[in-house]
Image (spheres, helix red, strand yellow):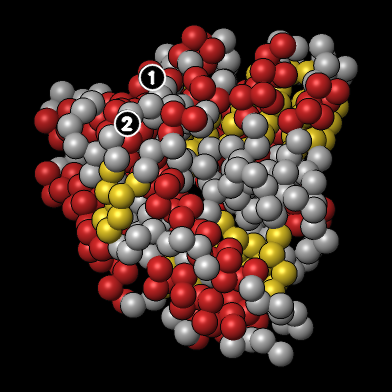
Amino acid sequence: MSPGFRGLRGVVHPGWQSRDDVYSGAMPMTFDVSRVRAGYPALRDGHAYLDGAAGTQVPEAVIDAIAAAYRAGIGNIGAAFAASERSGAILAESRAAIADLVGGTAAGVILGPSMTALTYRISSALAKGWGPGDEIVVSRLDHDANIRPWVQAAERAGATVRWAEADGATGELPAGQYADLVTSRTKLVAVTAASNVLGTRPDVPAIADAAHAAGALCYVDGVHATPHIPVDVASLRADFYATSAYKWAGPHVAAVIAAPALLETVRPDKLRPSPDEVPQRFERGTLPYGDLAGVTAAVEHLAGLGDPGPGSRRERILASMAAVEEYEMSLFARLLDGLAAMSHVTLYGKAARRAPTAFFTVAGMSPAAVAAHCAARGVNVWNGDNYAFELCQVLGLEPEGAVRAGLVHYNDESDVDRLLSAVAELAG
Ligand SMILES: Cc1ncc(COP(=O)(O)O)c(C=O)c1O
């Protein structure tokens, strides 16, 4: 078994300075998972929610913020009356909050309904500048939402698609291959900051550097990474960074973050009377202002998870997410050790740097049957390819995929142990 996390309230020892992460504070921090859990009403149903990779539960503070926005009265933005001004304030606050979460600027935060929708939108806009002879690079480690929009946009433009290969044995996406994949014709490199099934965290800065050396842009899918680590778009050297709030305790809203100066150079399709400035130029129709109040509350919630004490919101987020990462990875070791000890379980992926997401099969049983067995015991896990279609082909797991158990900040040892007991019952 893993060393555990010194019980439910433990001290996180900062190894932060030695990592490529951005938090360089030196103060040990506590992570009180029972306090965190108490903030989530849905957890009171007694289920072990190991499905966070498909969407987290939402804390009371986020529910309250959304309800408060509607209670106060909101209206479409741009009108002279107070309800409209309230929506304008909510919108500005949500852009600032997301910018703080990832280290961007509020004027570069594009909001939309989902990462998939935003990636289709941005790929169509960028592809207006592509033609035959141009190339893009996508990876087989990625969720399909960071593959297919680019492939389809390239096809329409007559551009060539090149593929970065994931290593099926390790789950790694070797960054070295980009030296050959990226050429002077490359327009864009799309890569994930973390695999949504194996958890692999590739060397995004090295991949982005390879893209930039050739004059290409790098579009980073941060949907699976953002809930688990401190994020800094500048350190990642991402030109675009996509994230979905429903994966980090927020509502179903997504954002793509980029430098406003870069956005100024891109002309998406838009309505004639809709705003032409950035980032509004990229936003289609009316935004969900009630939900956006919840986005800001979710960022505040993340900033407080590790109880980081005083500081700017950005400082609190970095410290808090460093504590989240430390806590989750400790719990993940318990999960991986437990599954690895079962001879009827096959685990996929053993990358050096991972998000806390396990992907496994059970001998003689379909992933759907394993997930149903777990569900009957109050343990929520996913089965299938989880849209990591290319990767599951590499792993030889299509069409059934595998079972995915993902940890987030509100999971505890009992959640992990309940999954381990449920899977242990399937031996022999
Ligand atoms: C890594 C990753 N990328 C992209 C997506 C798509 O996000 P959305 O549901 O916001 O379109 C997901 C959703 O599961 C994901 O896990």
Q: Which image quarter is the C terminus in?
A: bottom right
Name the residue at 43% across, 62% down.
4
Report whether 76 appears left or right of 261. left
The image shows residue 65 at horizontal and vertical percentages of: 20, 47
Q: Quadrant of residue 201?
A: top right
Q: Which residue is mark 1?
A: 105
Residue type, numbered disc 2: Ala
The image shows residue 367 at horizontal and vertical percentages of: 68, 74
Name the secondary structure under disc 2: loop
- The single residue placed furthest to the front in the displayed view is 3
Position of 248 relative to 183 (above/below): below
Q: Is mark 1 within 8 Å of ligand 1?
A: no
The label shown at residue 379 is none
Q: Which residue is mark 2?
A: 26
Report whether 48 appears left or right of 217. left
Name the residue at 49% across, 30% down.
18
Earlier in the chain: of badge 1 and badge 2, it is 2
In front here: 181 or 156?
181
Q: Quadrant of residue 179?
A: top right
Q: Is residue 191 visible?
A: yes
Residue type, numbered disc 1: Thr
Position of 182 relative to 306 (above/below): above
Q: Are marks 1 and 2 in contact (CB under 8 Å)?
A: no
Position of 139 relative to 48 (above/below): above
Q: Quadrant of residue 392?
A: bottom right
Report whether 145 appears left or right of 293. right
Name the residue at 82% across, 35% down.
163
In front here: 374 or 138?
374
